[in-house]
Image (spheres, rainbow, N blue to C red):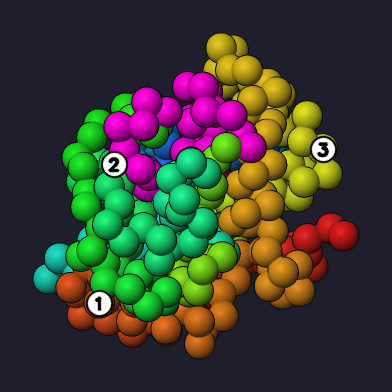
Amino acid sequence: MKLPSLSRIRTGALLALAALATAAQAQQPTKLRFALDWVFQGPQAPFLVPHHNGCYQKAGLDVTTDRGFGSGDTVVKVGAGTYDVGFADINAMVEYNARQTRPEDRLIAFFMVYDGAALSIITRKDTGVAKPADLVGKTIAAPPGDASRRLFSALAKANGFDASAVKWMNVAPELRETMLARKQADAISGAAFTGYMGARAVGVPKDELVVMRFPQFGSLLYGSALVVKRTFAASHGPALTALAQCVAQGIVTSIQQPAAAIEALYQRDKLINREVEQERMQLSLDWSIVTPWVREKGLGQVDPARLRKSMQEVSAALDIPAPDIADVFTAQYLPAPDKLVVPR
């Protein structure tokens, strides 16, 4: 009987090791660095649920989710490759893209979260402001970079008044609600649920607050979405679909089991007030995520006709070219439709 040569034994061993290494590599989860839009609060809880219930792990993902510092900062970091995916305002993404000369540097949204933009103007009843047109001659406090402030002209146009008829007061983000409470400003601009809860926290009774959300008053603007660099998406399609499916599941869990979602949030920040953050999360669900259109069509998607019109509004407000909607949103990485259904 002829024994195999030493070289053949070595070759066979090397092939076996290579096969084992390939199998091990195939089982390694895909790492994704995910940046949120803001600090860990109620509206960010749905993105933490997949960590808490194991969805990411089951989907073969190793996701690191970090707090954000505003949508503008998030899109810059995704564009720079510091993060792979971001949750950020789609309008901030479009403005960022307009500054990029190379197509490969631009971002694209692949899962719409805030079907109704969180943009708003918040005031007190004693100002007499009940609708956007009543803001003429009033003073609004906000940071210069606030999205609601920068896109205010879209709200003004939708309501038939001149945006320049309103006076703006520059203020640090953490002081705007205090300015409203002390009556040093007639109104403030900001994310609806954040501003509303913040104003209550500094002493404005909830029945004295007036929240004018852009979607309520004729603005077609979309809000925040999952965004990614085109070049990254091209080579990580299955991972993006898995991420989107887990986020969709996190939203559904937040709707059906809000306490479970807040528990996931608590595990990331033990200093939160559960009651406050659950109310804040519920407002984000009611005002921005679970809209009538989403109930009918499902999570994550956009209406192309509406997106096209909204991009025209953004173009006029920010003085940038209106982008082709194919460069703004893609449905290529969405999960199957049955994974996007909102529970009744």
Q: Quadrant of residue 245?
A: bottom right
Residue 96: quarter of image? bottom left
State whether residue 116 appears in this view.
Answer: yes
Looking at the image, which residue is at 55% across and 33% down? 197
Instruction: Please name the amino acid that badge 2 sits on.
Output: Ala
Residue position marked by numbered label 2 in the rendering: 141
Name the residue at the top extreme. 271
Residue at horizontal 78 percent and vertical 29 percent from the top:
259
> Considering only vertical position in the picture, is 20 above or below 313?
above
Mark seen at residue 57: none
Q: Which residue is mark 3?
A: 257
Q: Give the extent of the magenta segment.
A: 181-207
Q: Decide which of 142, 131 is in the foreground and name it.
A: 131
Q: Secondary structure at mark 1?
A: helix
Q: Earlier in the sequence, mark 2 or mark 3?
A: 2
As rendered, which of 267 and 83 lies closer to the eye? 267
Which residue lies under the disc numbered 1? Answer: 316
Image coords of residue 313 (percent x, y): 34, 77
Q: Which of the two marks, 1 or 2, is nearer to us in this view?
A: 2
Spatial CA span between label 3 and label 1? 41 Å
- Mark 3 neighbour density, 10 Å: few (under 14) some (14–19) many (20 or more): few
